[in-house]
Amino acid sequence: MVRAKIGDGAPVGSIFVGRRATGDRLDSRLRAQYPDRDWILTRILWLSGLEPGRNRLGNVDTMRRLIYIHGCPDDVVLGTPGSHGCIRMRNSDVVELFDRVPVGTPVLLE
């Protein structure tokens, strides 16, 4: 489920580190300087598991593992594994989702 929403009102392309906006926005210079970085951009929907003892308060606790739905650079190929466990979305799509779902919304990953 969505446990927390982070980044309300941040400009599209805002860079987040440790769930905090850095004040920078991704540009071609930063993208070239750090080509392999798993960028967390624009908005964060921080997820929490729903299975006590497993993905909630268990060995693979979703929230403690910092699993998010978040924005990514526009040139990233989506639909294939490529992040550090998060779900990446286009920035415009994550803004729309962020604005539509409240904290507590169930998320089913299959």
Image (cartoon, grey):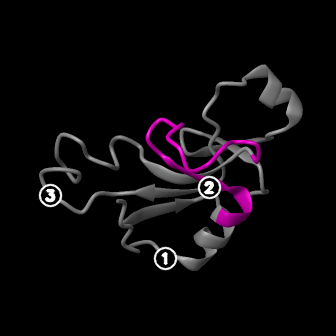
* Quarter of the view holding residue 24: top right
CA–CA distance between discs 2 and 1? 18 Å
Q: Position of residue 29 (x, y in %)?
A: 87, 28
Residue at the (39%, 67%) spot, across then down:
107
Question: Which residue is label 1 attached to?
Answer: 102
Of residues 32 and 104, the one nearer the viewer is 32
Mark 2 vs 1, N-terminal side: 2
Badge 2 element:
strand
Q: Amino acid at mark 3?
A: Pro
| Residue 44, numbered circle | none
- Residue range highlighted in magenta: 74-93
Residue at the (53%, 44%) spot, across then down:
80
Question: Chief secondary structure of the magenta span?
Answer: loop
Query: Left or right of 87: which side holds 55?
Result: left
Residue at the (32%, 49%) spot, across then down:
62
Is 28 placed above or below 57 here? above
